[in-house]
Image: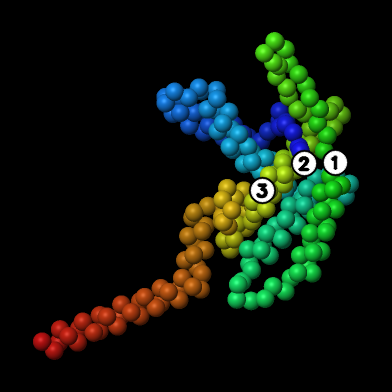
Amino acid sequence: MVQGRSIQQSSVTDKIRQAAEKKAEKRAENGVDLKVAIRRVMQANAPAVDAQLVLDEVAKPLPPEGDPMRRVHRIVELIQQLDRMVADLSPELPFTGEEKKKEITAELRNLIADTKFVIAPSTGAATYTGWPVTWAPPEGMDSEKANVIGALLRLGEQGLANRLRTCRSPECGQMFYARKKSQRFCGLLHQQMALLQSPEFRANRAAAAKDRRAAAKKAQRRKGGR
């Protein structure tokens, strides 16, 4: 199991903490300890923090050969390929990508197996009730890169790696973290835009317009026959 969380985090952590404090204050009004409430909300949002660390990295240009971040870029790319294959499956058509799926899965497993991630504990002032522990990369290791690797491994450990997706809106294509399993768009606006442009929606809209015209003509004929 991958333990701990680095002391260096994306700016999204601050935003989540602010939101957590607001939620926690409301819970505190109902008798819940404020610190406990903040910790619970932060734990619930921990995957989003990890996801943002990875998204920030893959938004950068592809690193050179030998850079461990190049591995991260490739892992995310393969995860997205597999996720799109699953999302695009049609119950009406046979699946023809089994060999490609096996090929991608094999490469992904090799990349994950070869990924090295080392963290070490650092303890604070101890009392008879306990002591604080911070897990961080050892001295000499690039902490920023270690943070990203650790975040990706934690997402995979929790079965959330495939939540790193590309918005399916033709006008977007931005990567995002899907908080819900079924989420395929980065936001409601792009989901609605894609819906309005879909062939199904256009066909339904045309059929509805045709029905309205037919109903109007029928009503007009009835009115003229009186």
**Residue ID for mark 2:** 149
**Residue ID for mark 1:** 116
Return the residue nearer the eye: 166 or 24. 24
Q: Say whether disc 2 or disc 1 marks the residue closer to the N-terminus.
A: 1
Helix, strand or loop status at disc 2: helix
Q: Say whether disc 2 or disc 3 marks the residue closer to the N-terminus.
A: 2
Q: Amino acid at mark 1?
A: Lys
Pointer 3 local density, CA inside 10 Å: few below 14, some 14–19, many at least 20: some
Count of marks placed on residues:
3
Whether pointer 2 and pointer 1 mark residues with C-beta atoms closer than 8 Å, the reply is yes
Q: Quadrant of the C terminus?
A: bottom left
Task: Please report the residue visible at 53 percent of the width from the left and 31 percent of the height from the top.
Answer: 20
* Residue 25 shown left or right of residue 173 in the figure: left
**Residue 189 visible in rendering:** yes
Residue 60, above or below 82: above
Quarter-of-image position of residue 9: top right
**Residue 159 in the image, given as x and y percentages of width and height:** 68, 48
Residue 59, above or below 173: above
Return the residue nearer the eye: 73 or 86. 86
**Residue ID for mark 3:** 160
Whole-angstrom CA distance, mark 2 to mark 1, is: 8 Å
Residue 185, above or below 43: below
**Residue 163 in the image, given as x and y percentages of width and height:** 64, 51
**Mark toward the viewer: 2 or 3:** 3
Q: How did the renderer colour the structure? A: rainbow
Helix, strand or loop status at disc 3: loop
Return the residue nearer the eye: 98 or 189. 98
Whole-angstrom CA distance, mark 2 to mark 3, is: 14 Å
